């Protein structure tokens, strides 16, 4: 019995929509952005900047999204909304 066809059919039924190139790129970069915002390691920042540059070059994101990503990666970036408990919470490393 060949279950690969059944598995493929099951997976396609679970996802009735397709992600766009931009959504896929933003998701991939966003997954790495969260640990970077917590740990702020230079190598994490370099990897994210490279991914953003590559996504722009491949046409997966537009110039406005690229500029926003660079803003998020800026060492001077501070979120516009913070809660009082956020400032008091100890930093924990995210893997």
Image (cartoon, rainbow, N blue to C red):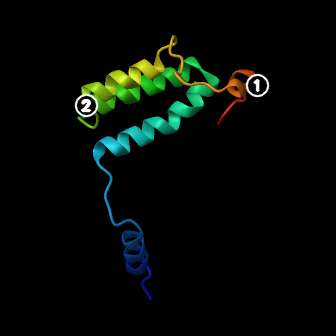
Q: Secondary structure at mark 1?
A: loop
Q: Residue at x 51, y 39 (%)?
A: 31
Label 1: few (<14), some (14–19) or many (≥20) C-alpha neighbours in 10 Å: few
The residue beneath circle 1 is 90
Q: Secondary structure at mark 2?
A: loop
Give the farthest residue toward the bottom. Answer: 1
Q: Position of residue 11 (x, y in %)?
A: 41, 70
Tell me how many marks there are.
Answer: 2
> Quadrant where the N terminus lies?
bottom left
Above or below, 25 against 46 in this view is: below
* Cβ–Cβ under 8 Å for marks 2 and 1: no
Give the quadrant of residue 91.
top right
Q: Residue at x 76, y 25 (%)?
A: 90
Q: Residue at x 40, y 25 (%)?
A: 69
Above or below, 23 against 46 in this view is: below
Give the farthest residue toward the top. Answer: 76
Give the quadrant of residue 41.
top right
Tell me, for residue 9, which label it has, or none.
none
Q: Position of residue 77 (x, y in %)?
A: 50, 15
> Quadrant where the C terminus lies?
top right
Left or right of 76: which side holds 58?
A: left
Disc 2 to disc 1, C-alpha distance: 36 Å
Give the quadrant of residue 50.
top left
Label 2: few (<14), some (14–19) or many (≥20) C-alpha neighbours in 10 Å: few
Whichever of callouts 2 and 1 sits on the residue coming sooner in the sequence is: 2
Q: Residue at x 47, y 36 (%)?
A: 30
Left or right of 3: which side holds 66?
A: left
- Residue closest to the eye, 86 or 56: 86
The residue beneath circle 2 is 62
């Amino acid at each position: 019995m060949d279950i690969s066809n059944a598995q493929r059919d099951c997976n396609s039924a679970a996802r009735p929509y397709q992600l766009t190139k931009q959504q896929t790129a933003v998701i991939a970069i966003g997954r790495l952005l969260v640990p970077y915002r917590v740990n702020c390691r230079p190598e994490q920042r370099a990897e994210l900047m490279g991914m953003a540059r590559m996504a722009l070059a491949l046409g997966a994101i537009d110039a406005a999204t690229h500029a926003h990503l660079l803003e998020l990666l800026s060492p001077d970036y501070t979120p516009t909304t913070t809660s009082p408990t956020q400032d008091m919470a100890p930093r924990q490393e995210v893997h």
